[in-house]
Amino acid sequence: MRTLYRYVFRELLGPFTLGAMVFTFLLLLQLLFNLARLIIVNEVPVGQVGLLLARSLPNIVVLTIPMGLLFGILVGMGRLAADSELTAIRAAGISLLQLYRPILRLSSVMAVATAAIYLFVLPWTNSAVQLQLLEIAARSPTKQVQARQFFEEWVGKVLYVFDAPADEKRWYGVFLAEDLPTGVTKVTTARAGELRLDVDNDRLLLVLEDAVVHEVDLENPGRYPTTSFQSSTQVLEDQFTSKQREKFGFSKDPRSMSIAELLAQRSRSQASPMLQRTALAELHKRFAIPVICLVFALLALPLAASVRRTSGRSSGFALSVGIIVLYWVLLANGEEGAVTGRWPVGISIWFANILFTALGLLLLWRRNSDRSLFGALRWLSRKVRPRGRSLAARARRPRGARSAASGRPSAVTLRLPSLGWGLPNLLDRYVFRTFVGVFALVQLSLIAVFMVANLTETMDEILRSSVGKSVVVDYYKYLSLQVFYDVAPIAVLLTTLVTFGLLSRSNEVTAAKALGISLYRLSIPAAVAAAGVTLVSFGLQAAVLPASNQKVARLKDQIWGAKIRTYRRADRNWLFGQGRYIYNYRSYDPEARALNNLQVFEFDADTFELTRRLYSSRAQYIGDAWLFEPGWTAQFSRGEVLDFTKFDAPSIDAYPETPEYFESELRLPDAMSYRELEEYIAELEGSGRRVPEMRIQLYKKISFPVICFVMALVALPFSFRLGRRGALYGAGFGVVLGMVFFAVFAFCTTLGETGALPPLAAVWSPNLAFALCAVYLFLGLET
């Protein structure tokens, strides 16, 4: 028995490790890009980034351990059932209950490991990650400000920088003003500047060179004084780090709290009932999620023992994803009901565990008694299937045969051999169908796992903002389109390896070679399918994602419960116009096409020096020019006032911005099509702004879908070299290949964003390098 138990244990260990690796890698993808940016842009030491990665892993591992365990049991035991080994074991008088012992040992170890991480490690690492990110931001505050973007993190102040070279810590062309100017306002302009952290006094300082300070009463400007400084230092925030730490301490989310802190919040009389229920729900979750390892083991064994001989691993994979999604949906709904007070906390959190345990016991009893798990469904299948087969046979029967069967004379049928190019033949269609089926399963699984992880991270914000379920459903509905686009390359890589791994395992590749079919010819259907996925990705990002990502951004704002960001220019108080103008206004009236309390700052395009300033209590667009009502204008040269003019009568002046500009929307690169983003970049570059990060986003709209085809090329030589080691080994190897590729891709694109590499080379070099290596290895295959 011990030999058998060790054999079963080893059979489960491989799929479990693979499943945990795949799920962990999927959830680490976005983190890889963020870490590359920290190393290159923020100049964070590699050791610190490695520490940040290590501290981020527990947050992912507590999810992927139960997922990998369920996957491992279903795939491992499904393989035993498919190869009739489980039948032989039971014929030897060994029941499923006895066979459950090695599964129980593995699941118990994983449950204890998950509980240890969730109870003791995760709260500390979550707090450590947030504090480390705070320290990184504090050590390099200059890197937090982007050129040509208004920075409004400090209360009552707005900062704008014309140029911020990636390889320097200094800015060029600095504009600092009050966020909502009223009465006497203060505006500071400078040729250069940078942020510094005064560690001794814990202050955030803005150090300026060749600065000019403008102080004036907007509505009653008796005079317009300016003060020039060769060097000036302004305190932006006192006790900067202390306040951030204090803010963090008071805003700890439940996942970052220790058991003692959760118990304290649960019993704190000053806390609201919702906060008390949230703390209690988190306490229950920290025990319910580790226990699910035991529940998944109980449920997976009878399901795996019931798979067909021809679909052991694929059935296990599909079942694992379905169970994972169902469990986390039930858990999320239970947590929502517990926090809102609709249901008791204990029942709400443990309901999914109780349900799956009862279902697992029922299925294990029925399967151990050799009873059908789903008797009613199989009875219905036996009734319907013969009728369906009869109709299908009649449909496939030749017309002559049907005529003869009906008693009518049949016509003579003359069959000639079909002439053609041999594409696609029967084998092509078979390989193509296999590829498409595996791709659909892998792609849906990756999307489902990503959604589960995202829901877990976002659940606290959903509960805090109390948004309706329709908002959450719409958010994930539109987000799934972007996730499909993001994980398609990984799905193609895994699909190619798994498809030919399955064919090699069943000796179908050997049979094809024996018939004189080369591996190159056998790969054509997979290459065509990968090219089809590439075309689908192209169409998705060109026609669908711009609109869906805009909806995702708005729905995310609602879920996070903060002040909803507006994407209409008219709803923003500060705008940078075409070329050299900064606009500030109190409000915009779209019906009258008028701006209220308007300020216009005009700068020299080369030196970024303020040359003219206009204020008007109201500006209305009439004809093709702006009509300014009472206000004033000032002309400057090297910080000195050359002319100051007040006007009471309406005055007409021309500016390049029209009402259409203020009524249009500010859109993120993900919410723009290729042509829209190209035009936007041309507009920015026409104003003198260098935007390599935008260029990266533009070129990625073409290069990223091509990664799907590149991943197929990369996988093909390895899928044949792995031979009869099978789909499981190929999938594990595919995870390693994917991690290497996306690490290189993240590194190169980040270099492109900083200007260290030309954007076109940064985006396309990983594709070209991996494609050339793949072709070289593919041509070296023995075929």
Image: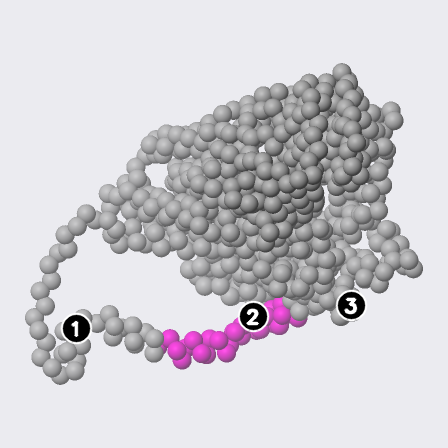
Q: Are marks 1 and 3 in contact (CB under 8 Å)?
A: no
- Residue at the farthest front position: 649
Nearer to us of marks 1 and 3 is 3
Instruction: Name the quarter where the N terminus is drawn.
Output: bottom right
- The spot of residue 36 in percent (x, y) is 61, 32
Q: Where on the picture, by quarter, is residue 156?
A: top right
Q: Are marks 2 and 3 in contact (CB under 8 Å)?
A: no
Q: Which residues are magenta?
A: 357-386
**Residue drawn 30% across and 76% down?**
390
| SS at mark 3 in the image | loop
| Sooner in the amino-acid sequence: mark 2 or mark 3 | 3
Instruction: Report which residue position mark 2 lands on.
Output: 367
Mark 2 crowd level (few <14, some 14–19, many ≥20, 10 Å Cα): some
Residue 487 in view in this figure: no
Identified by mark 3, the residue type is Gly
Instruction: Report which residue position mark 3 lands on.
Output: 341
Residue 481 in view in this figure: yes
